[in-house]
Image (spheres, rainbow, N blue to C red):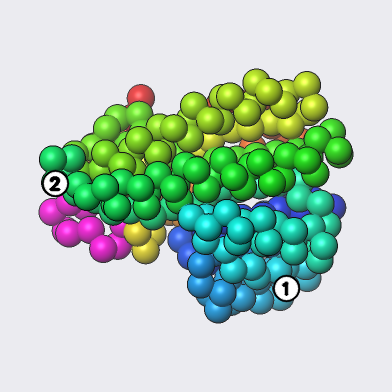
Amino acid sequence: MIDLTGQIALVTGGSQGIGRATALVLAQCGADVAVMARTLDKCEAVAAEIRAMGRRALAVQGDLAKPEEIEAGIKRVAEELGAISILVNNAAITRDGLALRMKRGDWDAVINTNLTGVFLTIQQVLPMMTKARKGRIINLTSVVAQAGNAGQANYIAAKAGIIGLTKAIAREYAARNITVNAVAPGYIETPMTAVMSDQAKEAMLAQVPLKRPGADADVAHAVAFLASDEAGYITGHVLNVNGGMYM
């Protein structure tokens, strides 16, 4: 069993889906967890689940498209729970559309949240991790960042950017014992994929050698591993959790 006792984790986009599952798994492993998302009541529900396990938890409202909310939220976590030692960048949005018809506003919204917001969140926690000379940063990317997908130029550009960002920060902070890795989920059953048409779901499933969609817990356990001491010699890596969808 992975032991994260004494660790303070922040999970962005932690109110549902992969983020919620990750927050719960980290708590099960012994971490105290802050859950950040745009909807505070959903965050509070997840925090209540964590407190029921006997762990400390904090619900924080924060929109990654708003730098001031990122800064205020992280400051509050540090004040109420302690210095963040595990950061999970999970929050993301979609504004799908074919490239020829994609509106500039939809491009900007996805890049601002899914890439710039991730960078700003990392930037806010690095001083804490640098001071402690230890930290774990895990960024959620996607199988489509590596394989491509029609109608998602903005989302894929952001998620591919996360892979590059992960490697850059991993290089910069390895000497401070801060590891930075990415997890690339494939077809996972979440609220985000639930809105897909049956035809789209069948097309995705046809590409999965294991012939089943993944569960949010599959991704959460991969994140917990990368957050653990057992993964201390892994950095700058992209861990695929996709049932063989992209090899």
Seen from the viewer's position, the closer of residues 29 and 11 is 11
- Position above or below: 191 against 83: below
Query: What residue sits 69% from the left and 46% below the top?
Result: 124
How far from the left and from the top, in percent, is residue 46? 60, 71
Label disc, if present, on residue 16 of the rendered structure: none
Query: What residue sits 71% from the left and 45% below the top?
Result: 125
Give residue 57's quadrant in the image. Answer: bottom right
Which element carries disc 1, helix, strand or loop? helix
Query: What residue sits 16% from the left and 58% below the top?
Result: 198
* Main SS of residues in magenta: helix
For the record, the magenta segment spans 193-202
100 left or right, relative to 119 = left
Give how far apart the Cα atoms at labels 2 and 1 are.
Answer: 46 Å
Query: What residue sits 25% from the left and 43% below the top?
Result: 152
Q: How many marks?
A: 2
How far from the left and from the top, in percent, is residue 5? 82, 52
Quadrant containing the C terminus is top left
Which element carries disc 2, helix, strand or loop? helix
Is the residue under label 1 in contact with that under label 2 (CB below 8 Å)? Answer: no
For marks 2 and 1, the one nearer the N-term is: 1
How far from the left and from the top, in percent, is residue 33? 70, 60
Confirm whether residue 88 shows in the render. Answer: yes
Residue for badge 1: 51
Seen from the viewer's position, the closer of residues 27 and 76 is 76
174 left or right, relative to 25 = right
Residue for badge 2: 101
- Hey, what amino acid is under mark 1? Arg
- Hey, what amino acid is under mark 2? Arg
